Amino acid sequence: MASSKPSMRKPVFVKVDQLKPGTSGHTLTVKVLESKTVLQKGRAASAHLRQTKIAECLVGDDTGTIIFKARNDQVDMMKPGATVIVRNAKIDMFKGSMRLAVDKWGRVEVTEPASFIVKEDNNLSLVEYELVNVEAEE
């Protein structure tokens, strides 16, 4: 009798240059090149109000770079020079360009330093996309 418990899928690691707008479920290993806090709000005086921290981090691998939007606890892990594994990440669009993000269904974890050299001249967040509505021909 086969067990009824579904088996866990082994993560398929992708490279930065394979990321496309509107996709999700990505797992990739990237190096953090820089991290810049763009939003920090909340009062430490009140225990039930959580602080909100958002940082834009330039991350990349040997195929290219992309901006990763780190939130709250993720911000502390995204130190320049760190190598992180981003699990179940999605592509958000911001002003027509791609941002890598991890919501509550994903995970960011610091890992062993990667041996690859980041390809810094291929920043996917600098590519601007335009939403085009395609009319169905009758």
Image: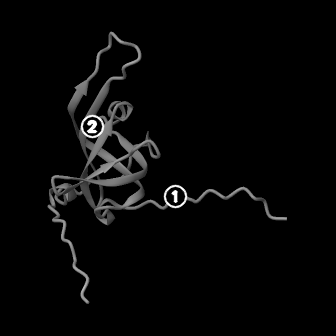
Q: Position of residue 81 (x, y in %)?
A: 29, 39
Of labels 2 and 1, earlier in sequence is 1
The alpha-carbon separation of the residues under discs 2 and 1 comes to 25 Å
Above/below status of 36 relative to 12 = above
Which residue of the protein is positioned furthest toward the bottom in this rendering? 138
The amino acid type found where label 1 is placed reads Pro
Which quadrant would residue 6 be assigned to in this image?
bottom right
Residue underneath mark 1: 11
Is residue 116 visible to the viewer in this orientation of the structure?
A: no
Extreme residue in the front direction: 138
| Residue 83 figure quarter | top left
Q: Residue at x 47, y 46 (%)?
A: 105
Question: Does residue 25 sit above or below 133 in this rendering?
Answer: above
Quadrant, the N terminus: bottom right
User: Considering only vertical position in the picture, is 96 above or below 57?
Assistant: below
Which residue is located at x 20 percent, y 72 percent?
A: 133
Q: Amino acid at mark 2?
A: Pro
Residue 59 is situated, as x and y percent measured from the top left of the image, at 27, 48
Give the left or right position of residue 81, taking residue 94 as reference.
right
Quick one: SS at disc 2? loop
Question: What secondary structure is marked by label 1?
Answer: loop
Q: Is residue 103 visible?
A: yes
Is disc 2 surrounded by few (<14), some (14 to 19) or many (20+) residues within 10 Å?
A: some
Q: Which residue is denoted by mark 2 in the rendering? A: 80
- From the top left corner, tell me how far across and down residue 24 is, in percent: 39, 58
Q: Quadrant of the C terminus?
A: bottom left
Query: Residue 45 appears at what percent x and percent y?
Result: 33, 9
- Up-down: is 95 above or below 128? above
Residue displayed at 36% across by 19% down: 49
Callout 1: few (<14), some (14-19), or many (20+) C-alpha neighbours within 10 Å? few
